[in-house]
Amino acid sequence: MDRLFKISRLKEILNKYDFKFTKSLGQNFLIDGNIVKKIGDAADLCEDDYILEIGPGIGTLTEELSLRAKKVISVEIDEKLKELLKETIPYENVEFIFQNFLKISLREIEEEKFGGRPYKVVANLPYYITSPIIEKILTEGENCKSITVMIQREVAERFAAKKSTKDYGSLSVFIQFFSDPIYNFTVSKSCFIPKPNVDSGLVTLKTKKDLPTINRDEFFKIVRAGFSKRRKTLLNSLSKSALNLDKDMVKKALKNSNIDENRRAESLGMEEFMALYENFKNLEEDING
């Protein structure tokens, strides 16, 4: 039988089940077999891998994952796909969970479905909900080894952006706090049905272990404040941000961090942001006694 990425097979399935794409769910299905296989290669899959997929659609990528990995747990929000997926993915090593991924307990999946073993996330994510999904995995997925996802190209580029580039921002710092990102390749919008308005990018996030034991909310507030006025210096951005930081305190924190007050946030790497956070915290502790 033809693979699911064959357009003739795809149309046959969609017609059989009278499937209608739901725009609000960001449903765009891959129809390029070469790309499907390249995703598997980029995720570095092997027969012992446990995989978590989000948004299988009709199972185009799921099929490839099932052929390469030991076990696949695939989470799908659209229950209209339940009967369709029974036909397209009849593989014993695949299990579907029909729920909103953002509302499920990732810890329960890790324990109940993977037995506490390390796993990889591989998915073609809906554009509209990319960031919340990635944030959930990075902050809740204790056993996740890597995340290989197809997302909007511009977002993928921001994930992997280096400091002092136009794409580098608070999102880049957030992603790079939790992982080491790799931009794999760009995928043309013509590789999907229906065709989205923009191209996609495949990015792999290799999750970091032993993360710094800091107040993450406070750290990322400072990062976002620094980027809040990109054309301004750090001194101006931080002192005029929503955090209402005292200008003299900002000057002192920058000086104690060996960061020139005339630099911009986009020029700071992770270690410098961390030093800035620590010095703000120390100054606040001194003030509060």
Image (cartoon, rainbow, N blue to C red):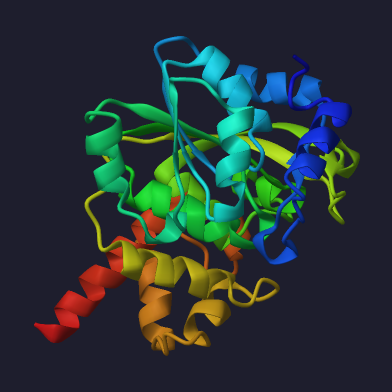
Name the quarter where the N terminus is drawn.
top right
**175 vs 50: above or below:** below
Answer yes or no: is residue 101 visible. Answer: yes
Count of labels shown? 0
**275 vs 30: above or below:** below
Name the quarter where the C terminus is drawn.
bottom left
Estimate the x, y position of residue 27 in percent, counting from the top left.
71, 53
Answer yes or no: is residue 174 visible. Answer: no
Q: Is residue 254 left or right of residue 115?
A: right
Q: Please tell me which residue is depicted at 85% across the width and 37% down the height of the picture.
A: 11
Q: Please tell me which residue is depicted at 23% across the width and 78% down the height of the picture.
A: 284
**123 vs 104: above or below:** above
Q: Residue furthest top?
A: 47
Q: Nearer the viewer, residue 67 or 84?
A: 84
Q: Nearer the viewer, residue 234 or 156?
A: 156
Q: Please tell me which residue is depicted at 58% across the width and 27% down the height of the picture.
A: 89
Q: Is residue 278 left or right of residue 80?
A: left
Q: Quadrant of residue 47?
A: top left
Estimate the x, y position of residue 288 in percent, counting from the top left.
14, 85
Estimate the x, y position of residue 153 in percent, counting from the top left.
75, 47
Q: Is residue 187 left or right of residue 89?
A: right
Estimate the x, y position of residue 67 in percent, counting from the top left.
56, 14
Q: Quadrant of residue 63?
A: top right
**49 vs 187: above or below:** above
Q: Quadrant of residue 61?
A: top right
Q: Residue furthest left?
A: 289
Q: Please tell me which residue is depicted at 90% across the width and 40% down the height of the picture.
A: 190
Q: Residue furthest front?
A: 16
